[in-house]
Image: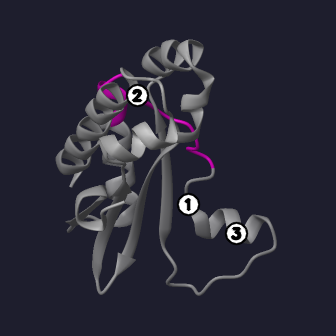
C-alpha cells in the first residue's frame, strides 16, 4: 500500500453534515446508494450504544455502494467482497471539514483477489468515480 497514492485527502469549507448531505445527493445522481444513512453520524451511533465522545466530536462514516455494478461483480466472484465496502470518512479538524477515502492500487487488488484479471481495472474505475464525487461535493 502506498499512502500517497491510495489515501485520498480533501478538505471542504462546508460543515460535516452539509458535506454529507451534498455527497449523498451526488452519490444518488450517479446510481450509487448510501447504505448507512441512519448510522453514519458516529457521535449519534456511539451514544446510542452507550459510548461517550466529546461534544465537539464530529465524524461521519459514509458507506456507499453501486448495487447495479456490485451485483454482477459479486455474482461473478464472491472473493471480491473483501474490497467492496467503500467508506468516505468526513470529520472536523482545525476548523475545517476533512475528507478521507482509502482505495487500493491495482497491485494490491490483484494480490488480495488473485486470478481475477478483470476486477482490478473495474474497481479502479469505481475508485476514480468516488474521488470525483468527493470533489464535486467539496
* Towards the viewer: 120 or 128: 120
In this view, the residue farthest toward the front is: 115
Asked if residue 136 is positioned above or below residue 66 in the image, the reply reads: below
In this view, the residue farthest toward the right is: 50
- Residue at image location 45% in from the left, 15% down from the top: 68
Task: Say which residue label 2 marks.
Answer: 32
Mark toward the start of the polypeptide (3 vs 2):
2
Query: Residue 135: where, in percent of width, then height?
Result: 18, 50
Asked if residue 101 is positioned above or below residue 112 in the image, the reply reads: below
- Residue at image location 25% in from the left, 35% down from the top: 129
Give the CA distance from mark 3 to mark 2.
Answer: 26 Å
Task: Say which residue label 3 marks.
Answer: 46
Q: What element carries label 3?
A: helix
Query: Residue 111: where, in percent of width, then height?
Result: 45, 42
Q: Is mark 1 on a helix, strand or loop?
A: loop
Asked if residue 43 is positioned above or below residue 64 in the image, the reply reads: below
Task: Let me know if residue 36 is in the magenta part.
Answer: yes
Stretch in magenta: 27-38
Q: What element carries label 2?
A: loop
Label 1, residues with CA under 10 Å away: few <14, some 14-19, many ≥20: many
* Towards the viewer: 75 or 111: 111
In this picture the colour scheme is: one colour
Label 3, residues with CA under 10 Å away: few <14, some 14-19, many ≥20: few
Q: Based on the displayed image, in which of its 4 quarters is residue 127 positioned?
A: top left
Give the CA distance from mark 2 to mark 1.
Answer: 19 Å
Mark toward the start of the polypeptide (2 vs 1):
2
Task: Say which residue label 1 marks.
Answer: 41
Asked if residue 40 is positioned above or below residue 94 in the image, the reply reads: above
Amino acid at each position: 500500500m502506498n499512502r500517497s497514492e491510495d489515501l485520498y485527502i480533501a478538505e471542504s469549507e462546508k460543515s460535516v453534515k452539509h458535506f454529507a448531505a451534498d455527497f449523498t445527493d451526488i452519490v444518488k445522481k450517479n446510481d450509487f446508494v448510501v447504505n448507512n444513512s441512519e448510522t453514519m453520524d458516529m457521535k449519534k451511533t456511539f451514544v446510542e450504544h452507550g459510548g461517550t465522545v466529546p461534544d465537539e466530536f464530529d465524524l461521519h462514516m459514509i458507506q456507499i455502494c453501486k448495487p447495479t455494478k456490485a451485483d454482477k461483480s459479486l455474482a461473478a466472484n464472491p472473493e471480491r467482497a473483501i474490497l467492496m465496502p467503500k467508506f468516505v470518512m468526513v470529520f472536523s479538524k482545525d476548523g475545517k471539514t476533512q475528507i478521507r477515502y482509502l482505495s487500493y492500487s491495482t497491485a494490491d487488488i490483484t494480490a488480495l483477489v488473485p486470478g481475477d484479471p478483470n476486477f482490478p481495472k473495474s474497481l479502479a474505475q469505481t475508485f476514480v468515480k468516488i474521488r470525483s464525487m468527493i470533489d464535486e461535493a467539496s
